[in-house]
Amino acid sequence: MALNREIESGVLRPGQRLPSERSLGDALGFTRLTVRRALQVLARRGLLEPDEHRGWQVRNDRVSDSLSTLVGFTQMAQMRGLVASSRILSLEYRDGTFDESEALRVAPGAPLLDLARLRLLDGQPTAIERLRMPTSRVRWPEGFDFTGSIYAAMESQGIVPTVADAFVDVIDASESEAGLLGVAPGRGLLRLNCVTTGADGVVISLETSMYHPDRYRFRAVLHKRARR
């Protein structure tokens, strides 16, 4: 069916509502009953799902993450019954730049770990994550597996990520970023920049993450400020 090709090629995006069964039948030259049966087949394949208006929409597997709670990627996946995994893109120990040192509140040129990873949910590329952490504050044993949960590893050392000063914007995907996430070059990516501190108020990491626009979104609950 043409819908199958359009969904798999990305012409129809996750969450996009389809025309009515009658409209699809008229456009494709089939009866409404034939169209309904075909849509039900696509639903069983996991490509479609009913929408809130009793029609059909492309299945939406985007993960929603709250901006009001600090949770690591691995823990977030576990809470939703998903499997998180990582692929290391680069890993090096180097001296920090002036801007990095200022953000991390360490001396200019202080050594840090610079780690870039591709983060996946149930095997689907979901985010490109880059962490920079001062080696004086977080130490990693020889042969440490950096594909696992960084938050869990820090907490095992008594370092608990507590507060993240973060902001979100949108950037155009470069060719390399697009290739890693499986989107078209120039596609808008959600970017999260944050500086994370521990329970003692000491900065422990500088993080930049770029998220697949069809697989991840951020949610915030806003409260009206009381008048004084």
Image: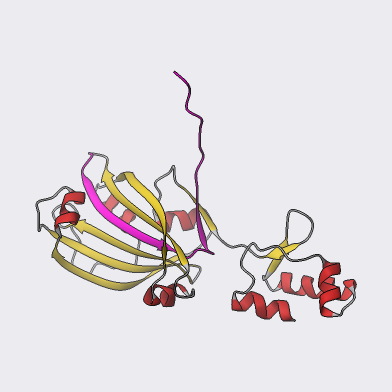
Question: Which quarter shows the C terminus?
Answer: top left
Residue in the image at 49% along x and 72% along y: 123
Q: Which residue is rendered at x = 43% and y = 44% of the image? A: 69
Residue sitting at x 14%, y 66%: 94
Quadrant where the N terminus is found in the figure = bottom right
**Percent x, y of residue 109:** 9, 58
Q: How many marks?
A: 0
Estimate the x, y position of residue 175 in percent, counting from the top left: 39, 77
Residue 203 visible in this rendered orientation of the protein: yes
In the image, is 87 to the left or to the right of 143? right
Residue stretch in magenta: 201-228
Does residue 157 appear in the picture of this structure? Answer: no
Image coordinates of residue 70 in percent, x first then y, are 39, 46
The residue closer to the viewer here, 222 or 46, is: 222
Q: How is the image coloured?
A: secondary structure
Seen from the viewer's position, the closer of residues 208 and 42 is 208
Instruction: Using residue 157 as the reference point, say whether residue 14 is left or right of it.
Output: right
Q: Quadrant of residue 143?
A: bottom left
- Up the image or down, 34 lies above or below 81; here it is below
Q: Residue furthest top?
A: 228
In the displayed structure image, the side of residue 127 where residue 3 appears, left or right: right
Q: Is residue 62 magenta?
A: no
Query: Residue drawn 21% across and 50% down?
Result: 103
Instruction: Tell me if residue 227 is in the magenta stretch.
Output: yes
Q: Quadrant of residue 41?
A: bottom right
Viewer-closest of 138 and 165:
165
Determine the image quadrant of residue 206. bottom left
Residue 101 is situated, as x and y percent measured from the top left of the image, at: 16, 53
